């Protein structure tokens, strides 16, 4: 039995986590916590916290979890460099699964994106397009950022220098090294991501479309069951799924 605390329980993902957890006998939800609630007391009854909140919340949760020796699963995206550094510091003391996307399909997309970039090589221009619901607070999505990091890694370029956010005005011709990112927002879209490889005469497009938050929730619950008892460190969904 894994005892789980949900942080951000009133949110879209928090609600999906509570609903999905109720269908898994090996999981006990010790508490759902949201803005303004005390986290410390219910944490003492949990083995692991799942955090789907806001980027500015996660580092504090990681520090508290580290001070209590409790594992953590981070679903929240959009962290600043300083927030990422605090989370990494906490991971010296506890195991943390930290993934921009918990769906099995998207983790397959990550794997396929690396393979396609390696096979197709530098002759193909790289563009990423993502679309999410109108309420999403950060852009580009954490999943798109992971896709961009994979592409930059294969191409051996610095992402910050290669990245081209949208295009406007007299941009001039596209450079060979740039990687385009376009964030669309609207309606109730749960999460669409397309990676485009465009060359002279042909184009490859890899697309994933999520139609239910349950896919992220079930992945995060699986990660929570997996992470308890692991050595301290940062793990991702590829570790949980055994894809490494
Ligand atoms: N990794 C993934 O697979 C994945 C999938 C979907 C969403 N996300 C990310 O998860 C996060 C949440 O997404 P959402 O759509 O559920 O957002 P949401 O706005 O619906 O929910 C966030 C919840 O966090 C709560 N919250 C804010 N401050 C808090 C605090 N200090 N303590 C506790 N709770 C607090 C809010 O009140 C709200 O209920 C976003 O960063 C989103 O990008 C990640």
Image (cartoon, rainbow, N blue to C red):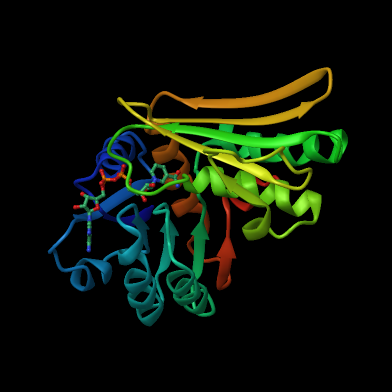
- Residue found farthest to the top: 201
Point out residue 221 in the picture as x, y percentages from the top left corner: 42, 46
Q: Is residue 8 left or right of residue 63?
A: left
In front: 234, or 71? 234
Count of labels in the image: 0
In front: 176, or 189? 176
Res 244 seen here: no
In front: 64, or 137? 137
Looking at the picture, does residue 210 appear above or below residue 46? above
Point out residue 58 in the picture as x, y percentages from the top left corner: 36, 65
Looking at the picture, does residue 223 appear above or below residue 230? above
- Residue found farthest to the front: 170
Q: Residue at x 50, y 25 (%)?
A: 209
Point out residue 98 in the picture as x, y percentages from the top left corner: 50, 58
Q: Quadrant of residue 173?
A: top right
Res 169 seen here: yes
Q: Quadrant of residue 184?
A: top left
Q: Residue at x 41, y 77 (%)?
A: 66
- Residue found farthest to the left: 36
Point out residue 105 in the picture as x, y percentages from the top left corner: 57, 31
Looking at the picture, does residue 155 appear above or below residue 194? below
Q: Is residue 167 left or right of residue 116?
A: left
Q: Residue at x 58, y 71 (%)?
A: 231
């Amino acid at each position: 039995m894994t005892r789980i605390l949900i942080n951000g329980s009133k949110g879209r993902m928090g609600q999906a986590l509570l609903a999905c957890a109720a269908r898994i006998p090996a999981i006990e939800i010790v508490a759902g916590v949201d803005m303004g609630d005390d986290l410390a007391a219910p944490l003492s009854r949990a083995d692991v916290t799942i955090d789907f909140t806001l980027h500015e919340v996660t580092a504090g949760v990681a520090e508290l979890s580290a001070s209590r020796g409790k594992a953590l699963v981070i679903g929240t995206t959009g962290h600043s460099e300083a927030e990422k550094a605090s989370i990494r510091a906490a991971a010296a003391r506890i195991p943390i699964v930290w993934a921009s996307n918990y769906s099995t399909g998207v983790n397959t997309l990550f794997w396929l994106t690396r393979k396609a970039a390696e096979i197709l090589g530098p002759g193909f221009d790289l563009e990423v397009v993502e679309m999410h619901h109108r309420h999403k607070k950060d852009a580009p999505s954490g999943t798109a950022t992971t896709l961009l990091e994979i592409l930059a890694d294969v191409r051996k370029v610095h992402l910050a220098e290669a990245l081209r956010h949208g295009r406007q005005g007299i941009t001039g011709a596209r450079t060979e090294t740039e990687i385009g990112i376009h964030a669309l927002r609207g309606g109730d879209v749960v999460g669409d991501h397309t990676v485009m490889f465009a060359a002279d005469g042909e184009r490859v497009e890899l697309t994933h479309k999520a139609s239910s938050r349950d896919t992220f929730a079930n992945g995060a619950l699986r990660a929570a069951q997996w992470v308890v008892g692991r050595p301290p460190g940062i793990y991702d969904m590829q570790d949980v799924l055994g894809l490494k």
